[in-house]
Amino acid sequence: MPDASAYPMWRYQRRFQLAADAMARSAFSSLDEAIEARLFLVGFRRDEATEGPAACVEPDGLGHDASLFATVPALADELYREDPEHRTRPADSVAQQSPYDRVLLRSWQRAVERTMAREEDAAVWRSFASWPVDVEDYRVVCVLQLPDEPVAAYYALNRDTVDDYYRVATSLLDALAEVFLTECGKALGEHHPGRSRRVVDSTISELHRNAGRGMTQTLAWVCRSYESVHALYDALCDLAATRYEGAPTRGRLLVSAREHPNVERMVEFDQPVLLEDTRAARKLLEVTSGTLCALSEGAELHGLGRLSGAYDEEREDLFVVDFVDHQAWQLSHGGQVLMRVHYGQPGLPVQPLDAGKLRSTIRRIFRGIGDEDITRLRLMVRAATRQANGTLLVISDHAAEEARRLAVQSTLIRPTVLTASLVHSLSAIDGALLVDPQ
């Protein structure tokens, strides 16, 4: 049994932190192995009359001293009083006097995040805070940190609030951070949090799908399509999974307010079609081609049209959904991919191939390889990355030997000099290509 004197917040604080940290690492590294997340706890004593330090950090080896958070309670109170939602409510309202007041909880969250933003390592780590949860004598906040460099490589929206205080996701990683911290908050609210081995009940796949839903909720909020806030992601997945006369779903959907200045409506439906009416919506997608797109504000298809004029990307209120293959679609803004979805599972956009790094890696692994072979391999790898559903290209000095070993479960071909176009064609089906570097 843990020594209570060593863990002033509550008996199982260390076990909770270790389990949550491990889950965070898995959740983010499975999207991109370069994103090595970490999580720590910070607790604030709720009553000055009780014993124990005013603020605690678990663990204490990350360089965040408890004194850093000494001003958080005062800052949270200041943010609470300045919050637009708080100012518009009667002083004697029930919500305002409740410890579960969402404005109060949100103020604590923002106070911790602002405090972390002033830290010396703020340029190295991006910090996200959960809503606080009262655990025994302490108000506890989970702080999730993501390394800035790999996260910054992915496109993200700038606007993170709607109507001044409703928080929306700016990227899939941002959405996953919110989903994960919400799960941690629920776990903190359980009896003796950390006592059981598992802290977060959701699987990694479930966390990712909920993050995908969070990303599409941004569209619904921005387009004021409130009825589609919780349904848009699954409706798009259902559309991508529905064939029309045996053909996979392909087409383009523009998501914006109905009267967007950069959307030219060419056909208006007399009766809009709900996106959740999968068969009818899928049939209408079949007529989209080239610049002709289906139009939606998030809940229903109301016509056909096209992009028009020069869109001001700072508006962040016009999004594109491309259905690229069976059960495969992607969400974009301003020509930048925000999220790719394959068989209901969201993923990050494919990063542009770093030709210099690839060339260096090939030289390091295959000693003595010539420039011509390096160029050929680089073009083959680039062709493989363009597959809509991904593929596997295995480059080995022992390719011929390995091919013979796998002969029963593969299709052998005679030694052939592969070109980029041939690689793209051969990798269109499930499986892997085995290639000799020469």
Image (cartoon, rainbow, N blue to C red):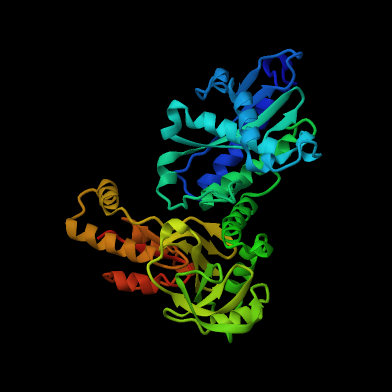
Task: Confirm whether residue 19 shows in the render.
Answer: no
Left or right: 399 as drawn, with respect to 22:
left
Residue 61, placed above or below residue 243: above
Residue 402 percent location from the top left of the image:
39, 60
Which quadrant holds the C terminus?
bottom left
Q: Say which residue appears at 54% left-offset and 63% top-offset.
A: 341
Residue 244 percent location from the top left of the image:
58, 83
In this orientation, which residue lies closer to the viewer: 15 or 188?
188
Left or right: 146 as drawn, with respect to 433:
right
Which quadrant holds the N terminus?
top right
Residue 165, placed above or below residue 314: above
In this orientation, which residue lies closer to the viewer: 27 or 111?
111
Residue 225 percent location from the top left of the image:
63, 64
Toward the bottom, the furthest residue is 245
In this orientation, which residue lies closer to the viewer: 152 or 199?
152
Residue 355, placed above or below residue 27: below
Q: In which quadrant of the rendered view does residue 273 lie? A: bottom right
Q: Say which residue appears at 28% left-offset and 60% top-offset.
A: 377
Residue 128, placed above or below residue 315: above
Q: Say which residue appears at 57% left-offset and 59% top-offset.
A: 222
Task: Confirm whether residue 220 shows in the render.
Answer: yes
Residue 265 percent location from the top left of the image:
50, 79
